[in-house]
Image (cartoon, rainbow, N blue to C red):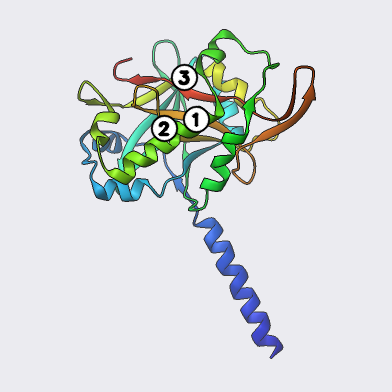
Amino acid sequence: MKKTILFAVSAMFLMFSCQKDNSQEESGVVSAAQKENWLSANLDSKFANSQKQVTAYLFANEEMSKLVKTPNITEVRFVLGYESNTIQVSIVGVDKSGKELGKINSTILKESNYEAKLSKLNELSVSKTNKRTPLVSEHLLLPKDAYAGILGWKEKLNSVKDLDEVTSYDGLRFRHFSLESSIVETMVNKANTANIGVFFGLNPKGKVTTILISLDKNNAVKKTSITSKGETGDVLDDVLDGVRPSPPY
């Protein structure tokens, strides 16, 4: 009897562990073939059903930190590819001439109950006392706007409408999104950040963009409780929007 109970408990633990591991899938650097596949992919119901399972693309904070602090890297690019009816994303660091100097793989997060974690964005604000450069402020998103943008993309996938339109510029599909490395560096320097989550969302023009959110070790939105002159309560580390798609930039 004891052996039976022990076996059952062990099996339950194993099932739980497998379920936890299955919520994340390792993804390699986007290949040339995957890039080409993305440019001609049919964004139909098969794509929408597969892409809806993707919560975010995770980039380990430690790896991201090494990349953006690499000498001569001035820009990071979120490169898009396509495989198994799903968008693939990897990051490359480039210099001023566009030469690649480093790459990072993503881990695809698939967490069906993530909505509860994400909805916390509506309860948070950004710090009014944080000192930011004009460049960082230019890419700063309010948490509620980030949440609305992410939901907007999910709604497009649910309706399977205008997917070609929102992922392209003048009929040419977006190849990558770019952001200055100095901006990303402000995110990776924050304490207790385990991953930088890259979420797809819609910008005010209704086009797909990348939204960067700092996540903790449980991949929950990272927040900080503060009590300082001018503000109190829970605030969010800066949420950034990689607003430069290629094309046209």
The quadrant where residue 249 appears: top left
Considering only order in the chain, which callout, 1 or 3, is on the residue closer to the N terminus? 1
Residue at the extreme bottom of the image, as rendered: 1
Q: Mark 2 is on which residue type?
A: Gly
Which mark is on residue 19? none
Q: Is residue 209 left or right of residue 159?
A: right
Foreground pick, 55 / 99: 55
Mark 2 residue element = strand
Where residue 20 appears, x then y in whole percent? 55, 57
Q: Is residue 70 visible?
A: no
Give the answer, above or below, for where 229 lies relative to 87. above
Mark 1 residue element = helix
Check disc 2: other Cα within 10 Å, few if <14, some if 14-19, many if 20+.
many
Question: Marks 2 and 1, how far apart in space?
Answer: 7 Å
Q: Nearer the viewer, mark 3 or mark 1?
A: 1
Give the answer, above or below, for where 25 lies relative to 118. below
The quadrant where residue 155 appears: top left
Residue appearing at x 66%, y 25% in the figure:
189
Which residue is label 3 attached to?
A: 179
Q: Nearer the viewer, mark 2 or mark 3?
A: 2
Give the answer, above or below, for where 140 lies relative to 83. above
Where residue 167 appears, x then y in whole percent? 29, 30
Q: Mark 1 is on which residue type?
A: Ala
Which residue is label 2 attached to?
A: 201
Question: Marks 2 and 3, how far apart in space?
Answer: 16 Å
Foreground pick, 39 / 98: 39
Residue appearing at x 59%, y 27% in the figure:
66
The quadrant where residue 182 appears: top right
Which residue is label 1 attached to?
A: 146
Where residue 180 appears, x then y in whole percent? 49, 16
Check disc 3: other Cα within 10 Å, few if <14, some if 14-19, many if 20+.
many
Quadrant containing the N terminus in the rendered view: bottom right
